[in-house]
Image (cartoon, rainbow, N blue to C red):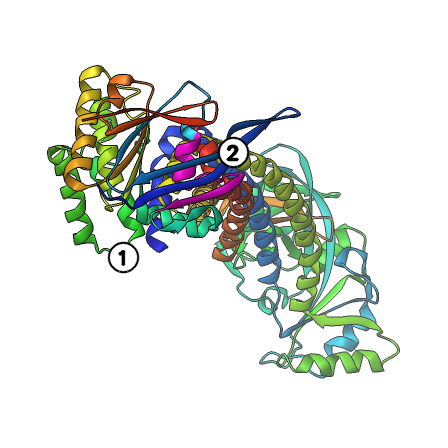
Amino acid sequence: MLKQITAVTLINLKSIPQRFWLSLSTVVAVALVVMVLLSFLAMSAGFRRTLASSGADDVAIALRAGARAELNSVIARDQVRLLEDAPGVARDAQGRPLASAELYLVVDGIKRTTGTKANLPLRGIGEAGAAIRKGIRLVEGRMFAPGSNEVVVGKSLLREFQGFELGQTVKFGTGRWTVVGVFEADGSVFESEIWADLPVVQSLFNRPNTFQILRARLTGPEALAQLKAYNDGDPRLKLDVKSEQEYFSEQSSQTSDLIQKLGWPLAIAMAFGALAGALNTMYSSVASRSVEIATLRAIGFGGFPAFVGTLVESLLLAGVGGVIGAVATWLIFDGFSAATLGASFTQIVFSFRLTPALIGQGVALALIVGLIGGLLPAIRAARMPIVQGLQG
Amino acid sequence: MSDMPLVRLAGVSKGFVKGRDAIAIFERLDLAIPEGDFVAVMGPSGSGKSTLLNLLGGIDRPDAGEVHVAGSRIDTLSEGQLSQWRAANIGFVFQFYNLMPMLSAAQNVELPLLLTRLGKAERRRHVETALAIVNLADRAKHYPREMSGGQQQRVAIARAIVSDPKLLLCDEPTGDLDRTSADEILGMLKVLNRDLGKTIVMVTHDPAAARFARRTLHLDKGHFEEKELAA
């Protein structure tokens, strides 16, 4: 049986050049489906990775109870003081708490690609703000000086938005600010931010004694429970305390889920189009080979090898389309930089990320198209009456 | 030539439906062809010559009656059983050769052997022998498009005999050939019958082709009429 299947499959595959353009159209249609799907999935994975890499499990954040993002959170100074002294918060060599109360504001920026306005996050951070976060490195210039109108900007923000080059002066609100440094943060969401000295931001934006988030390094991941218990037990606090990792995971899931929910239906709708193409190609293939199939059956070949041969041809065409789609997506989109609105209504710059698992999903979809597209023609090939087939 | 019939039809009826009408091709047809015979079947278009050949080859089924070929009653076999039976007992030669255009002559001839348990070396030996019988040993690697009609039909004959079947069924084997090539093919069939003992049933319109057979059966209006015995 295996010899029969191999022979029939080989005959089918060798006859593809006779149906070159029709076969090519199926390959291209499937490739496009896979490209659309993978570009959405790569976008979602890239966005998720950017936010996921932003969070540490040994850094706690506190927001106003019920606030889902920094923008709609407010924390009072006395609450900041209470949390800084809470158990579980790490301290530096001088015994000062490794905590940073921060103010998060939205300012305008201009996208390099489109020249349009976009919301950018300006973060006022405390002295320990940079040290608490993991992977922060200045790659150009220096850190802003306390008490000055100076900012440092993330590398991704500099890449996507104009006017933030080192030494440039930018206008936020009523004040003018000088860019004195550029930092990177392992590709995390912080690379999409502008940082300045907290008291200066509070003053120039008229937000004295107001904070939106407190970020504190813990003595270890297990200290989070201790801090939560402390927060829950003090009626003056009643904040939402969670790990930074948990916070960013929540933030990423909303947007990346939305991207996936757009991507899959679009890809599936296109897959139906490709399926019609595959069906047409394979029915044409069976029709154009009807004499060959019938001759083989007359010689003594069974219907099953004809079935398998047709199915293999369909799977091969779709598989080639899938691989071409995956390679094209990888060449075009892997590492492609984009920016979108995050949960705080500010731009988050992220890179498309095409993982082997995503490529697997794309090729699997292609093979499903090939399988369904080849199934009915394969059944026709196997059941075709020999006499009818010999008549062509 | 043996007296034992290799082919026996008993009360075979076959028809088709056209619109609301059932049209009979033949009714209660009887036929016996002994092993080693070479029979030409002639008759007007629509008389059922090709249908008869299809019934003998197990690629069509009668509406009624029994079809016995090579010791098996084939009208009751399943599709799978028929495939195996055809592989073992029947060699087909078609009017338009029906070669696989993407396979070489040797690969075309090898096809029936893929249904056997023969190893690669044995298959190659059988293919060489079959191609030598049809005088095409030197064209083994040529593709159908590189050969004339006569040569392609010789490859088709090699394919039909390579697994040493008892019965060759030839449907207008010279219908697409010029006279010289046709005579060459018919001479070859005659040799296969005379020297290798192959039983041959050949459908033809051509009286000159029929003269190569041992006898000719005329099929008309559902009945056979034996017209002539060849020398």
**Residue A354 placement, left or right of B214:** right
Q: Which residue ends up furthest to the top in the rendered image?
A: B179
The residue sitting at 49% across, 31% down in the picture is: A284
Q: Residues within 10 Å of mark 2 (few under 14, many from 20)?
A: many
Viewer-proximal residue, A222 or A148?
A222
Chain holding disc 2: B
Residue with the mark numbered 2:
B14
Q: Any magenta on residue B66? A: yes
Tell me if residue A348 is in the magenta stretch: no
Question: Which three-letter amino acid code belongs to the residue tagged 1?
Answer: Arg
Number of the label disc, if any, that sits on residue B98 = none
Region of the chain picked out in magenta, as a range: B51-69
Please identify, in this view, whether the residue under mark 2 or under mark 1 is nearer the observer.
2
The answer to whether residue B76 is above or below residue A67 is above
Residue A6 visible at all: yes
Q: Which image quarter is the N terminus of chain B in?
A: top left
SS label for mark 2: strand
